[in-house]
Amino acid sequence: MCGICGEFNIKKHPANAGALERMADAMAPRGPDGSGVIIRDHVGFAHRRLKIIDLSDASAQPFVDTALGLTIAFNGCIYNYQQLREELTGLGHSFASSGDTEVILKAWSQWGEDAVSKLHGMFAFALYNREKGTLTLVRDRFGIKPLYYSQSDERIRFASSLPALLAGGDIDTSIDRVALQHYMSWHSVVPAPRTILNGVRKLPAATIRTIEADGSVSDKIYWRPDFSRSKTDEERSDGEWQDMLLDALRTAVKRRMVADVPVGVLLSGGVDSSLIVGLLAEAGQEQLATYSIGFEAAHGEKGDEFKYSDLIAEHYKTDHHRIFISSDEMRENLPKAIQAMSEPMVSYDNIGFFLLSREVSKTIKVVQSGQGADEVFGGYHWYPPLAGSNKAVADYANVFFDRSNAVLAEHLSPEYMADKDETLAFVETHFAAAGADDPVDKALRIDTNIMLVDDPVKRVDNMTMAWGLEARVPFLDHELVELANRMPSKLKLAQGGKGILKEVARRIVPSEVIDRPKGYFPVPALKYIEGPYLEMVRDSLSSQQARERGLFQQSYLDKLFAAPADHITPLRGSELWQVALLEMWLQTHVTGG
C-alpha cells in the first residue's frame, strides 16, 4: 500500500520535477517507509512506500525494467502474486525482487491488458512503455485504491490523492455544479469521473486507460458486474448456496493474510467483522490482534458497541484493543480528519476510522475490515421495499437521497444549481443498463459498484492511509462478489437483510452478534450538533471564505443554526454537518476558498 503520482507531458517538454516532489510529499503518510522519483524526459513517476510485501529495497518504486522498457508505480496489494510469479517463471521470466510490484510489470509484458484480469487484489498503477511512448493507468474492480488525475492540452498528472494533485499546482479549483448536486443529493456520493472540483477527475473502477504518445486517450472496462443466473443457479438449494458462500469467504479471508508483516482485524462487533475473526480463528490464526473504537454518548444515543466486540474478542481469545475517544479529543482531531479526505465525505465514520487507524498503526500495519458486506449481501433497509417494485428508481431515491432537486433549489444558491436533475438521471441510466433485471439487483449493483466506491471504500482508504495503515476488504473479493451476484435476491433480503450471510455466520460465530439489531459506527456528537461543535460549524459557514463562495442560501443556513437536530436526512445524517463539512473541506484544501 502506497502513494503514487506522475506527469506525462504531451508536448514532450521535461516533466516538472518540482511538481512531482510536492505531490509525493503530500502523500508522505500513505508511504512512510520510503520514497522515489524517476524522470525520463517528458515522463516522471514518484512513489511513497509502505512496506508490506518484500521488505527489502529490491521492491522499491518506481520500478524500472530496462530490458522490457517498462516503468511502473503501483499502489495496492496483489494477493495471488506468488502464483502468478510461478507461472511467469515457467514462461521464462526472471525476477530481481520477491514482491508483487515486479509481478505486475512482468505480467503486463507477457499478456498486455489481459494481465489485469488475472490480478486478485486491490490496485491502482501507472505503467510507462518506453518503446511505444504510452502511459497506462489502471484501477481495480471496485476502486478500492484511488487514482485521481488532471488533464490539460500540455500534460496529464495523476496521484493517489486529490490533495497531492493540488500540491502539484495549476489546477482549476472551481466547483463542479453536477458534482455538488451529487454530493448534496446522494449522501456525498460523487460518481467517477467527477470530483467536487472542475480541474480534478478520477479514473472509474475496473478501467484501463491508455494515453498515447500524442495525448489521445482510450478506455477499456475489463470487468462488469453480472446478476444474470443460469438454470442451474435458479435450481440450487439454499444449503448449496450457503456451502458455496462459506468456501468463497474462507478463500477471500485467507487471500488477505498474504503479507510479510502481521495482519489484524478492525472489529466492530457486527456480523461482518466478527465473521472475519471467526474464519481466521478457524484457519488456525492465534493471538490475532483486534481493534474496536467507541465515543461518548449524546442525546441518550450510545456511542459504542463494545458489548459485542468484547464478546467476539473473548470468544476467540484475540489480542483485543478497546479504544475510547472523548468528545473533546474527537473535536480536536476533526480538522486532521478533514485534511486526510481526498474529497468531502459526510459520513460520521470518517473521524471514527481516522482515530481508530491512528491507534491501530501504533502496533500493526495491515488489517482486514468488513466494508462491503451490506452492499453485496443486501444489508441496508432500502433493499426490501424494492422487491417487486415497478418504480425502482423513485423508490430507491426516496429512501437514499438526502433531498429532492426541488428542495435542493431552496438550499443552494442559484448560481450553483445544475441545469437539470443530474443525480436522478444518473440512477435512471444505471438502473436501465443490461445485466440486472430484478429491482433489488439493480440497487445492489449501483451500491456495490458506484456508492460503495465513492463512500465507504474511499473513506476507509483515506482514513487508514492517513496513518500508513493498509486496510483489506475480503467482502470485495471479486470472485466472492460474482458468486453473491448470482444468488437470488430473496436469499439476501431474508432475516432483515444479509440473510444468507447470517446463516453462514451461524456456523462460525456466536449467535449473539448475528441476531442483534443492525449497528452503525455511532458518533452521536456529529448527528446532534450542539455546544462547541455548533460553534465550530457556525464559524466555518459564517467565515469570509464561505460568504465569498456563497454556496448556500443564508435562509437555509439560519434554519440549520437555529435547530440542528431538527434537520436529519433519511439516512440519519445531519444536514448542518453535511454543508459544514463541505465548506471546511474547501477551506482546508483549496487555497483562499
Image: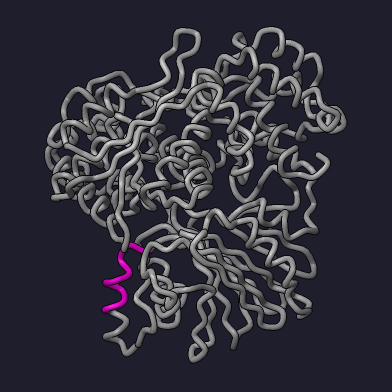
Tally the marks.
Answer: 0
Camera-nearest residue between 355 and 280:
355
Q: In this view, does 10 lie to the left or right of 229?
A: right
Residue 468, image x, y percentages: 48, 52
- Left or right, 139 with respect to 567, comes to left
Task: Give the image location of residue 351, x and y in percent.
Answer: 52, 33
**Residue 221 visible in the current orientation:** no
Residue in the foreground of this view, choosing between 588 and 385: 588
Q: Is residue 370 left or right of residue 191?
A: left
Q: Quadrant of the N terminus?
A: bottom left
Please name whichever residue, 177 or 241, is drawn nearer the observer in this view of the structure.
177
Tell me if residue 190 comes above or below residue 383 in the rendering. below
Residue 309, x across and y down, in percent: 28, 29
Q: Does the magenta stretch include residue 80?
A: yes
Q: Kindly identify the residue that appears in the image at 16 percent across and 37 percent down.
A: 316
- Eyeballing the image, is 218 above or below 264? below
Specify the color scheme: one colour
**Nearer to the camera, 393 or 568:** 568
Which of the 4 quarters of the picture holds residue 150? bottom right
Residue 158 percent across, percent down from the top left: 64, 62
- The residue drawn where x is 59% and y is 44% is 340
Give the vertical position of 170 relative to 474 (above or below): below
Which region of the structure is painted magenta? Answer: 78-86
What is the quadrant of the C terminus in the image? top right
Q: Is residue 293 visible?
A: yes
Q: Is the magenta stretch mostly helix, strand or loop?
A: helix
Q: Residue at x 12, y 35 (%)?
A: 507
- Residue 439 sits in which quadrant? top left
**Where is 80 relative to 588, above or below?**
below
**Magenta span includes 566:** no
The residue drawn where x is 18% and y is 42% is: 241
Where, by quadrant of the figure, is residue 46 drawn? bottom right
